[in-house]
Amino acid sequence: MTAPGNTEVVARSSASNRAFDVDRIRGEFPGLHQDIKGKPLVYLDNAASSQKPQQVIDAISDFYAHDYSNIHRGVHELSERATKAYESARLKVQAFMGAASEREIVFVRGTTEGINLVADSFGRANVGEGDEVLITTMEHHSNIVPWQMLCERNGASLKVVPINDRGELEMEEFKKLLGSKTKIVAVGHVSNALGTINPIRTIIELAHAQGTPVLIDGAQAAPHVAIDVRELDCDFYTISAHKMFGPSGMGALYAKESLLEKMPPYQGGGDMILSVSFEKTTYNRLPFRFEAGTPNIAGAVGFGATIDYLNGIGMDRIAAYEEELLDYGTNALRDVPGLRIVGEASHKASVISFVLDGIHPHDIGTILDQEGIAVRTGHHCAQPVMDRFGVAATARASLALYNTREDIDRLVEGLATVREVFS
Ligand code: 7TS
């Protein structure tokens, strides 16, 4: 094992004092500079997945070209280099999330696997007959289905906090539903379908007041706002690299060491053990106990590069820029005749979901694509949200740090074309 120790220093943020320079940032994303259907691409599907900067592409390519090998096993030079690259990415994620120790960062496939890991492992040990799991109406399916599966398996029941017409959690209902039977609360930091930023600090405080741990699904928060798991005092926090300008098939689960230490293994296999015999297997130390098999090594390297990239700009600067852009976009779309925004919470990030009178969202998406504009249409893997608002689907423009007011203006023009086609 050649994993570096906790003594290696990783700067939490090395943002320079330069102004937020969106033109420079755009220049770093090759995927943005292409024509689609003969028109310059406007990429507004960032909540599904984001484009990648050259720095991340180069880090992955250089790693494969020069330093690639399996990790944690070889005494040879390449295995040592690959292990060092993989483990230094873990330290970067640790610093980015504000975790106390690298033992609290488990590399996973993405947010979906992070939640499944907790539902399976923590759930197996802690959620039994008659217990309750508390989630909310606005969760992504990946923060619903693993809990449903757990409840079904262990005889527990799923409780759901409702939302109001603006798309905000009904906190009085949350307080009523949080009871002595609640074994875990699982809630999204930012909703992918509505853009709502949830009051997770309050949720964590209320749950902890009665000893209930909290999992935060941070898939839609991590690309947009700074995360500090220690300040939040959450118990679990999951993120996906591919939404953060990093590689797909890669993500991280933060889990408090005290909880992780007591959780049974998730998957069995190589690297998660200390010794194996047919009589008895002993498990590896944290976090390796939760990383069975050869992991996404190059994915971790790319994840580390994406964190360097974000730190180089500064999450606070990104959040401030995007807040202004979201305001601009919201006001511009409100002026489109027949358009209704779905999700108007007072605290929002990055997402504008909408419907147009008499026009199916799928048709909106198809015509916008003809104009070179990429948005997502459908239920956004949040069908209960669609049911709550009485729509089958919405169109969704989701912003990232490289979007501009011109992108929004192109969207508004595109929507005028959609209306013309259907008039
Ligand atoms: N949680 C939230 C809030 C999400 O938005 C998503 C993906 C996930 C979990 C799952 O993340 P994964 O990386 O494991 O797939 N959301 C979306 C979306 O809005 N459009 O496509 C995927």
Image (cartoon, rainbow, N blue to C red):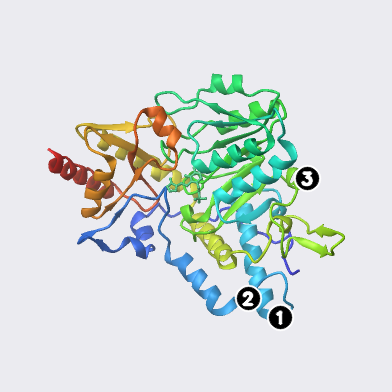
Q: Which mark is residue 262?
A: 3
How many C-alpha atoms fall within 10 Å of the one at disc 1: few (<14), some, or many (≥20)? few
Amino acid type at mark 2: Ser
The N terminus: image quadrant:
bottom right
Q: Is residue 180 above or below residue 108?
A: above
Q: Which mark is residue 69?
A: 2
Q: Position of residue 138 (x, y in %)?
A: 48, 33
Amino acid type at mark 3: Lys
Q: Are marks 3 and 2 in contact (CB under 8 Å)?
A: no
* CA separation in Å, label 1 and label 2: 9 Å
Q: Is residue 288 visible?
A: yes
Q: Nearer the viewer, mark 3 or mark 1?
A: 3
Give the mark, 3 or 2, whose residue is nearer the N terminus.
Answer: 2
Q: Is residue 55 above or below residue 68?
A: above
* CA separation in Å, label 3 and label 2: 32 Å
Q: Is residue 276 left or right of residue 339?
A: right
Q: Are marks 1 and 2 in contact (CB under 8 Å)?
A: yes
Q: Is residue 401 left or right of residue 14?
A: left
Q: Which mark is residue 295?
A: none
Q: Is residue 349 left or right of residue 119?
A: left
Amino acid type at mark 1: His
Q: Position of residue 279 (x, y in %)?
A: 87, 60
Residue bearing the label numbered 1: 76
